[in-house]
Image (cartoon, rainbow, N blue to C red):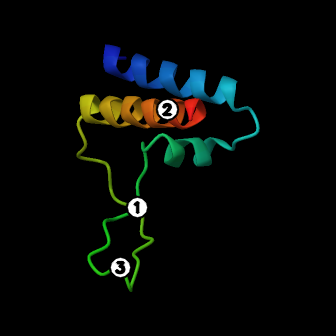
Amino acid sequence: MKQEHKLILELLESYLEKNPSQRFGQALFNLNINEFQKTTDPRNPNYNIRDIHGDNDLDIIERIKNRLDLIESQKNN
């Protein structure tokens, strides 16, 4: 297992420990690991899941950390 994999799992584990009522799949979306496809027309939203197969592990880590920062900043307001 690569170090990036370990870090992703540690971030996910920490999040789920702090939010035990969340389902696993819900946590994947809340941390921006899984995402919906971008919508080109706001009048016609696209709720298809984006294929993250080609995403770099470091990009996923960055998305998770950005989302955790946003969640934390919302708690402080």
- Looking at the image, do the residues carrying marks 3 and 1 touch, with CB atoms under 8 Å apart? no
SS for dot 2: helix
Circle 3 sits on which residue? Answer: 42
Q: Amino acid at mark 1?
A: Phe
Front tag of 3 and 2: 2
Quarter location, residue 63: top left
Q: Amino acid at mark 3?
A: Pro
Percent x, y of residue 27: 58, 41
Whether residue 61 appears in this view of the structure is yes
Circle 2 sits on which residue? Answer: 73
Residue 27 left/right relative to 45:
right
Label 3 neighbourhood size at 10 Å, few (<14), some (14-19), many (20+)? few
Rendered position, 68 above or below 43:
above
Total of numbered circles in the picture? Answer: 3
Tell me which numbered mark, 1 or 2, is placed earlier along the sequence. 1
Quarter location, residue 67: top left
* Disc 3 from disc 1: Cα separation: 14 Å
The residue lying at 28 percent from left, 31 percent from top is 57
Residue 55 left/right relative to 49:
left
Circle 1 sits on which residue? Answer: 36
Q: Amino acid at mark 2?
A: Ser
Query: Residue lying furthest right in this view?
Result: 21
Percent x, y of residue 26: 60, 48
Front tag of 3 and 1: 3
